[in-house]
Image (tube, grey):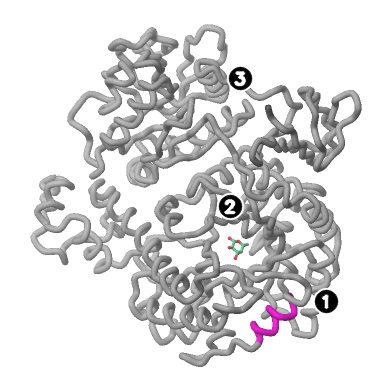
Amino acid sequence: MFYFGVDYYPEHWPEARWPQDARLMAEAGFNVVRMAEFAWSKLEPSPDVYEFGWLDRAIDVLAGHGMRTVLGTPTASPPAWLMAKHPDAFLTRESGRAVTYGNRRNTSPSNEAFRHRTRRIVEEMAGRYHDHPAVIGWQIDNEFGDRDYDAPAFRSWLRGRFGTLDAINERWGTTFWSHTYTDWGQIPVPLSTGGVPNPGLALDFARFCSASYVEYQKMQIDILRERCPRHFITHNLMGFTYDLIDYFDLARDLDIISWDNYPRGFWNIAADVDASAMALGHDTMRGLKRQSFWVMEQQAGAGGWDVVGVTPKPGELRLWAYQAIAHGADGIVFFRWRTARHGTEQYWHGLLGHDGRPGRRYQEAKRMGHEIARIGDDIVGAQVRANVAMMLSYDTRFALQVQPNNPAFSYPAQFHGLYRALHAQQQAIDIVPTDEDLTPYKVVVVPSPYVLTEATAASLERFVEAGGTLLVTPRAGVKDEDNAVVDRPLPGHLARLCGVVVDDHDSLPEGAVNALDLPGVPGAQGRIWCDIVTPQGADVVARYGDDFYAGEAAITVHAFGSGHAVYLGTIGNDVLNEALAARLLEMAGLASGPPSAPGVERSVRWQGDTRLVFYLNHTDREQVVTLDGGDHRALLGEPAADGRLRLAPRDVAVLAAKEG
Ligand code: GAL
């Protein structure tokens, strides 16, 4: 079943209103609600006193109108009594000071008292709802993430990883500045060290923080799995942009991935929304388990806590929700139902306004609800099949947070720049971890594999040897797993594969560029970082145009086995990224997608041998797409007899075609 619904907070509204809400939801074609993820104080008003009656009634009222429930465990927002009783559970921030009560996500996942209270509430909820016919699944907590400056917990995690202090001293190289540790209690959390900490310690601390959320989540999952075997378990993640948790690790214990998609949050009140940024979020989330996912919070209106965000324009809510579906979503849940009257998120607009009246946003969701009721079964379970993969490494991301190398060097921005260029070529793209089997792909792009294991290097070699086309970008192979610099020429373990040695490099001053001499691509520029590359078997494709290394190699291609490894020694501007994307596809024998229209995204899912083609008009003008012939069954949006598809501003079409 395709799940389509809304995040609902019955505890914010008089019970007498619930039936009207449920009726409006049913009229909109909704079939699911998520509830209770912030309702701890209503569920456990005082220690070990549980009150589930109100939630039972809410679930029943909604079920009476056909709604299934996903229950959130409420642990992102502990009640005031809990924190007053256990003040040591408050999270410490980068300042070294603990937060005070008054927001959420304010606890350390390692704190034993908090973990005890967590287990209790989760056990009680699981016991209450394990066989409720309307409950289908669980969302653990809400948007995990932060640092965990719990020094004893960090040390015990280090013991598990390294075993002995000697191993730590050796692998972190603590002789430097006499940091040699002779007792576990001496190891600091890198809080107020007065400057850049030891890179080995800092990377392991980032890994520990990530692992402590993974472990805290696992603690809840174990309880739910045992008591609610019929229910699925998910967590609402935060897409590509969130960078303090290794999402591949967090995903491992979940049944399905869901995430929160806010193209126009209040933190981004820019006029334009970048469709490729949303697409990257979806592809990253699909990549975590290589399966369909849900959007558990799909923007329903303008964002707003203190500042009010730009309101989504007519058609955008539906367009964004269909874009999610085009990239693999099998569930869409809007956040939130009705705009809250109280609390921090008073201005976070729901489908209904404060006054509870259904307006244009509700009507737009309702339109889509009726469409999904008609076409959801055609879509649900359909796969995205990609020939192109981009390798995402959280170890690299963490290590570059510690030492960005250049103030402008941003792993996510570079990753997005390369993704955007491939996405513009209408390629389906999988986002894969460093240990993924690369056999299914024709092109693999590995932005800055800074922390690189020999195993990953060997897997990339196998991929190219077997005929694959690889792109690697600078700061490749610089560090080992302990964040120590390797003792071999760069790009380290990739030097043989890329057929180059990086003899020198230049970290560019702010705003500086180096014009590249790349035949046929005027305007190609290197930015931020320039590796001065010496080919050792590779052919030179582009040379630097400026500075003392003008004429030296900037981009090379190395024929290796039956494939090719491209080394890009700099961070490209858009012109260069676009040219490279086209070139890589060409080298791999992949046609870029059939022509669409400006600002129209074309994305494909496969239901067996049926191709579902989504056309998404991200512009505020009508666009006309000329279809590529063949028989289409229009699920949404009828093409004209002349084979042209007219898409109104922000409109969507879905066409099905049988292959072969
Ligand atoms: C999400 C969060 C929701 C709500 C929303 C709007 O990040 O999961 O609970 O806060 O943002 O601020």
- Kindly identify the amino acid type of the residue bearing the numbered disc 2: Phe
Q: Which residue is mark 3?
A: 591
In the image as oriented, which residue stretches furthest toward the front?
A: 660
**Which quadrant of the figure has residue 404?**
top left
User: Ligand 1 appears in which quadrant?
Assistant: bottom right
Frontmost of labels 3 and 1 is 3
Which quadrant of the figure contains the C terminus?
Answer: top right
Pointer 1 residue: 20
* Residue at image location 55% in from the left, 68% down from the top: 231
Disc 1 packing (10 Å; few <14; some 14–19; many ≥20): some
What is the magenta segment's predominant secondary structure? helix
Given residues 56 and 132, the one toward you in this image is 132
| Magenta stretch holds residue 59 | yes
Between the C-alphas of marks 2 and 3, the distance is: 28 Å
| Mark 3 or mark 1, earlier in chain | 1
Labels 3 & 1 near each other (Cβ < 8 A): no
Name the spot of residue 221 as percent of width and height, x first: 44, 68
Residue 36 in the figure: left or right of residue 456: right
Instruction: Name the residue at 26% across, 63% down.
Output: 154
Q: Say what amino acid the circle numbered 1 marks.
A: Gln
Q: What kind of element bears circle 1? A: helix
Question: Is the CB–ligand 1 distance for label 2 below 8 Å?
Answer: no
Judging depth in this view, the residue of 348 and 37 nearest the camera is 37
Residue named by callout 2: 293
SS category of the residue bearing label 2: strand
Image coordinates of residue 110 in percent, x first then y, are 34, 70
Judging depth in this view, the residue of 229 and 561 nearest the camera is 229
Residue 78 locus on image (x, y percent):
49, 78
Instruction: Indicate whether residue 607 is drawn in magenta.
Output: no
